[in-house]
DNA sequence: TTCTCAATCGAACACTTGTTCTGAGTCATT
DNA sequence: AATGACTCAGAACAAGTGTTCGATTGAGAA
C-alpha cells in the first residue's frame, strides 16, 4: 500500500467536500493545504495519477477544471446547490466566545446560495435568551456568522465589549479615533467605544427565525 | 429595454450551456466571446449587475467561480430539496392587504426544506419601513407567510387590526371571548382584542434577514 | 554500506484570469 | 450645440493558478 493511496483518498474527499460547498473545483494550492501536501508539484503529480486511474478528470492549463468521475455524491451541476453550515454553538450576550470550532457541530443548517454567498468559515450560532433584542434577534434565532476579525465599515458584526463583558450584534463604523456601534433597531442610538475595548468575532451574514 | 437585458440574458444562457458541457464556470474571456462583448471589463460590469439582481453568484478574485442561481425565464426548478417561493409584495404596517397573488412575483427566494416544509400557498413578503419592530422585524426583512385564515393557538400570524388599521405580526391566542395578540418581543405586553376586530392573513413560517 | 528510484519540497516560471483605468462612442436631456 | 450619464473597447495591470525543474529525503535493493 503506497502512501499515494492515502493521499488520493484525502484529495478526492476534499474535492468532493469543496464541490458541495462551493460548486466548483478547488485550486492546487487549496488541495495541497487540505490534504497535507506542501508543494503544488506534489498535488499535480497525485492528480495526474488519479486522472489515469479514472477517479477524476481535468483540462490541462485550465484553472479549477477538476471534475470527479467515480464518486456518486459529488454534484457538479450549475444550479441550485445548497450549502451545509455547522451549528457550532450558542450566542449569548454574556458569553465571550461564540465561535467554538473545536467541538463537533451540534447540528447542521442547510441554506441556499441566495442566502449566503460562497465563503469559508461560515458558522451558525443559536441565540440564547432575550438579551439581544436590540439587535432584533430573539431566543432561538439562528445567526449566520462569518468568522473574521477585520471588518469593513457598515458591516454587521458580533462584537465583544470587554469593559461591560457583553456580546452583541451591531453595525460597525470606524470613525476618527473611535468605533461607533449602531444597533439594528433604528430607534435606538449608537454607542461610541474605544477601538481596543472591542473584539470583533465575526460578520453577521444573515439571520433566520424558524417560527413554530 | 436597455441593452444590458439582452446581454444579461445571453450571458446567463451561455453560462448555463457551458456548465452543461464542461461542468465548470466559463472565464470572462469565454463569456465575452460567446455573448459578443469584446472587452473583459464589459463582462465584469455585466456580471456585477447580474449578481446584484440575484441571477448568479461568484467570488471576487477566484477564477471560474460563477454559479447560476435562478433562471430568468421561468420559475426556478428547485431540485435537491429546495423550494422556490415567490416574493409577491411588500409588508407594511399600514397596508391592509399583504398578499397580492394576482400579480407576477417580483422575485423568487429559494429555500431549503429545513426552513419551510413543502406546501402550497407559501409566499414571501418584504418588510417595508421600521414600523414592525415590535415583531423583531425591520426594513428589508423577508417574511415567509403561509396564506390562510384559520390558525392554531400559539402560531405567529400576520393580523390586520381593523379599528386601528394596522398590520402586524403577533402570536395568536384565542382565549375565552377574546383574542390575545402577543408581540415577538417578550419585553412588550400582549394586547387583547375582539375576535371580529382582527383579520388573519396568514401564518408566519419563518423570517430571514440578509445582512449587507 | 551504497545505489537506485520514488516521494517530496521549494522555488521559479509562464500562462490564465479577474480587475482597473483611460478614452471613445451613443443617447437622451437641456 | 452642450452637457451628462451610460455603454463599450482597448490596454495595462495584478493576482490567481498550473507547470516545470533542481535539490533533498527516505525506503528498499544490491
Image (spheres, coloured by chain):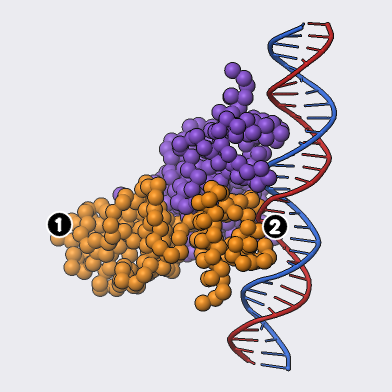
Chain colours: A purple, B orange, C red, D blue
Q: Which chain carries label 1?
A: B
Q: Residue A85: x, y in percent?
A: 48, 43
Q: Which residue is drawn at 45% across and 51% down?
A: A80
In this rendering, the answer to whether B85 lies above or below C15 is: below
Q: Mark 2 lies on which chain?
A: A
Q: Residue A151: x, y in percent?
A: 62, 52
For label 1, the residue is B176
Q: In which quarter of the image is residue D2?
A: bottom right
Confirm whether residue A204 shows in the render. Answer: no
Looking at this view, is B11 or B170 the one in front? B11
Q: Residues within 10 Å of mark 2 (few under 14, many from 20)?
A: few
In this rendering, the answer to whether B64 lies above or below A74 is: below
Q: Which residue is drawn at 51% across and 77% down?
A: B1
Q: Which residue is drawn at 49% across and 48% down?
A: A77
Q: Is mark 1 on a helix, strand or loop?
A: loop
Confirm whether residue B46 shows in the render. Answer: yes
Looking at this view, is A100 or B60 the one in front? B60
Disc number at residue B39?
none
User: Going by the picture, which residue comes out furthest to the left?
Assistant: B177
Report the side of A114 relative to B61 (left or right): left
Q: Distance between the residues labelled 2 and 1?
A: 58 Å
Q: In which quarter of the image is residue B162?
A: bottom left
Q: Is mark 2 on a helix, strand or loop?
A: loop
In this rendering, the answer to whether A118 lies above or below A48 is: below
For label 2, the residue is A177
Amino acid at each position: 500500500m503506497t502512501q499515494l493511496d492515502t493521499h488520493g483518498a484525502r484529495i478526492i474527499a476534499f474535492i468532493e467536500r469543496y464541490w458541495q460547498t462551493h460548486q466548483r473545483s478547488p485550486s492546487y494550492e487549496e488541495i495541497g493545504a487540505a490534504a497535507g501536501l506542501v508543494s503544488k508539484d506534489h498535488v499535480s503529480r497525485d492528480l495526474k495519477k488519479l486522472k489515469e486511474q479514472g477517479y477524476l478528470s481535468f483540462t490541462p492549463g485550465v484553472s479549477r477544471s477538476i471534475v470527479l468521475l467515480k464518486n456518486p455524491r459529488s454534484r457538479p451541476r450549475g444550479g441550485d446547490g445548497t450549502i451545509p453550515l455547522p451549528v457550532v454553538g450558542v450566542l449569548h450576550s454574556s458569553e465571550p466566545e461564540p465561535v467554538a470550532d473545536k467541538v463537533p457541530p451540534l447540528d447542521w443548517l442547510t441554506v441556499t446560495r441566495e442566502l449566503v454567498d460562497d465563503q469559508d468559515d461560515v458558522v451558525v450560532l443559536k441565540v440564547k435568551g432575550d438579551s439581544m433584542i436590540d439587535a432584533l434577534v430573539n431566543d432561538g434565532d439562528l445567526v449566520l456568522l462569518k468568522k473574521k476579525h477585520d471588518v469593513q465599515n457598515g458591516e454587521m458584526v458580533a462584537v465583544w465589549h470587554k469593559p461591560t463583558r457583553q456580546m452583541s450584534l451591531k453595525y460597525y463604523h470606524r470613525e476618527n479615533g473611535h468605533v461607533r456601534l449602531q444597533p439594528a433597531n433604528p430607534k435606538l442610538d449608537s454607542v461610541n467605544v474605544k477601538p481596543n475595548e472591542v473584539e470583533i468575532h465575526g460578520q453577521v451574514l444573515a439571520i433566520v427565525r424558524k417560527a413554530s
